[in-house]
Amino acid sequence: MDSWIKNLLVTLDEKLDEATKIKIMEACGADCPFTHLNDEKLMEIKKSSGNESEFLQKLSKEWRVIFENGNVYVVFDKCYCPLVNENPEGASKTLCYCTMGNLKKKFRLGLDRDVEIVMEKTVLAGDEECRFRVMV
């Protein structure tokens, strides 16, 4: 991980409360250039879908969307953020709020409404995967 990123995350963690960190990082994530699914592809999936359920099913064939016990999740088997994925050791899970913001934007575009995203697990927090529950 680049030292400037580590310094940024350490500073955020030391100086800000959790709600403020989430707000800042989600805003960054909404415009992340390293998104896991570009808006054009997302809109193609949306246009070819007749309803939300069909959209989610098609999205799951193109992206890391899974369905478990009546819930919808976006799951990553490792940290794909190019800012830290080469060396995630020592990175703060604060960075994962960026992904959460990106996911909120993607589902807002795809479903034409705001959805809540719950960050349940992250590799940067020591978990075996990143798991975000989508409240559809």
Image (cartoon, rainbow, N blue to C red):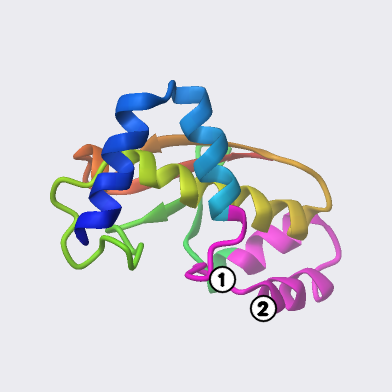
- Of the 4 image quadrants, the one containing the C terminus is top right
As shown in the figure, which amino acid type bears the numbered disc 1?
A: Leu
Residue placed under numbered mark 1 in the picture: 37
Give the tally of numbered discs: 2
Q: Label 1: how many residues lie within 10 Å, few (<14), some (14-19) or many (20+)? A: some
Pick whichever, 13 or 116, lies toward us.
13
The label number, if any, that marks residue 29 in the structure image: none
User: Could you tell me what secondary structure mostly forms the magenta stretch?
Assistant: helix
Residue 80 position within the rendered picture, expressed as x and y whole percent measured from the top left = 34, 64
Asked whether residue 32 is drawn in magenta, I would say yes
List the single residue furthest toward the top: 17
Task: Give the residue displayed 41% in from the left and 53% down from the top.
Answer: 75
Residue placed under numbered mark 2 in the picture: 41
User: Where does the magenta region start and end?
Assistant: 30-59
Contact between marks 2 and 1 (CB within 8 A): the answer is: yes
Q: Label 2: how many residues lie within 10 Å, few (<14), some (14-19) or many (20+)? A: few
